[in-house]
Structures are given as structure tokens and as C-alpha cells.
Image (cartoon, rainbow, N blue to C red):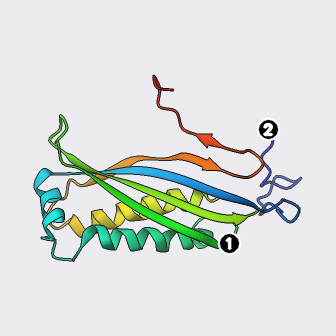
């Protein structure tokens, strides 16, 4: 499959979406932040000096989704109709004695191109915000597993990430 963001001479270009039909589009992305159990307890009790960590991460994620064309070359500016940020605290420590927070971003639009990058950027910036707000008490905060979970709309239709071994 050819890369459609390259012109005939192999140079980068923004894809022309003029003739693509407008469709309802959604994208859901997730990621996970790992932290010490006492750090998660501080977040839950409002004991982080910089403020309400998850409320600020939520706003940061929404703001990031709206800024994707300024951050990622060749992305189209989109009129987003909704950005939802959700956080699930996982208080049971893993084998490395780390708890986690799962971040989920759901982005919607009615347009000619998808919102996958907006959803993944929202998750990334929310994770960075949690790190920034907690780094004074926990230098071991890390994050990863950022991925597109699903998308709907457009020519390629629906995509759903399948976890290996599950259907």
C-alpha cells in the first residue's frame, strides 16, 4: 500500500481530503501510568501539592486533543465534537510493587478524516501531566502501553484492537 502523504517526488504533503465524504468518527485510546502505592493514595486523598492530579490531567488531555495539528506534522485541523477523558485507578500493586492509573480518551468528530491521533495525544499528555504533578514525591512514575483501542467511521470502517488470546 503506497503512503498517501508523499507526493510523486517522495516529499511530504498534507493529504487532500476535499472529496472524502463527511462521516461520524470516533477513536478511543488508552495508556497506563505506573506509580508507587503511596503516590496513588496521595492522588486519591488530594495530597499532591500541585492540586487535583486527575482533574488537571483531564483538562490537559482535552487541550492536547485540540492541539494535534500544531504538534504533529501533516495532521489536519479538525472540529472536535467531543473529547472524553476517563481514569481508572488500579490500587493493587503488581509484581514490581507499582499501582497504576489507566487513562482512556474518547474523541469524536463529524468530518473527512479520523481522530486517532487526537485520542492518542490526549492520553500521552494526560500521562505526562500526572508525571509532572507527582514527580516531586515519586521519581519512579512511568507510563506506557499507549495504543488505539478502537475507531469508527471513514472509508476503512471500524477497527477494534484485539488482545491476543481473546476474541
Place of residue 91 in the rendered image (x, y in percent of width and height, measured from the top left):
18, 48
User: Which residue: 47% across, 63% down?
Assistant: 122
Place of residue 69 in the rendered image (x, y in percent of width and height, measured from the top left):
63, 70
167, above or below 111, in the image: above
Which quadrant of the figure has residue 74? bottom right
Q: Is residue 75 at all visible to an observer of this figure?
A: no
User: Which residue: 49% across, 52% down?
Assistant: 29
Which quadrant of the figure has residue 71? bottom right
- Viewer-nearest of labels 2 and 1? 1
Which quadrant of the figure has residue 48? bottom left
Place of residue 50 in the rendered image (x, y in percent of width and height, measured from the top left):
21, 77
User: Which residue: 18% across, 64% down?
Assistant: 43
Q: Which residue lies under the disc numbered 2?
A: 1
93, above or below 142, in the image: above
Please indicate whether residue 70 sits to the left or right of residue 130 in the image: right
Compare residues 139 and 101 and report the one nearer the observer: 101
Compare residues 50 and 59 and report the one nearer the observer: 59
Place of residue 166 in the rendered image (x, y in percent of width and height, measured from the top left):
46, 26
41, above or below 30, in the image: below
Mark 1 surroundings: few (<14), some (14-19) or many (≥20) residues within 10 A: few
Q: CA distance from mark 2 to mark 1?
A: 25 Å
Quarter of the image containing the N terminus?
A: top right
Please indicate whether residue 114 sits to the left or right of residue 11 in the image: left
Q: Which residue lies under the disc numbered 1?
A: 77
How many badges with numbers are in the image? 2
Secondary element type, mark 2: loop
Q: Is residue 136 at all visible to an observer of this figure?
A: yes
Amino acid at each position: 500500500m503506497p503512503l498517501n502523504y508523499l507526493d510523486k517526488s517522495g516529499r511530504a504533503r498534507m493529504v487532500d481530503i476535499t472529496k472524502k465524504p463527511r462521516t461520524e468518527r470516533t477513536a478511543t485510546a488508552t495508556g497506563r501510568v505506573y506509580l508507587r502505592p503511596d503516590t496513588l493514595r496521595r492522588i486519591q486523598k488530594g495530597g499532591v501539592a500541585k492540586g487535583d492530579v486527575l482533574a488537571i490531567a483531564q483538562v490537559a488531555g482535552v487541550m492536547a486533543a485540540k492541539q494535534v495539528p500544531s504538534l504533529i506534522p501533516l495532521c489536519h485541523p479538525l472540529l472536535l465534537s467531543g473529547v472524553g477523558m476517563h481514569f481508572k485507578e488500579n490500587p493493587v500493586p503488581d509484581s514490581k510493587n507499582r499501582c497504576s492509573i489507566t487513562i482512556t480518551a474518547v474523541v469524536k468528530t463529524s468530518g473527512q478524516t479520523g481522530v486517532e491521533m487526537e485520542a492518542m495525544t490526549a492520553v500521552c499528555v494526560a500521562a505526562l501531566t500526572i508525571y509532572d504533578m507527582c514527580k516531586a514525591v515519586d521519581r519512579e512514575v512511568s507510563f506506557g502501553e499507549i495504543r488505539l483501542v478502537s475507531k469508527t467511521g471513514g472509508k476503512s470502517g471500524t477497527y477494534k484492537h484485539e488482545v491476543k488470546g481473546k476474541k
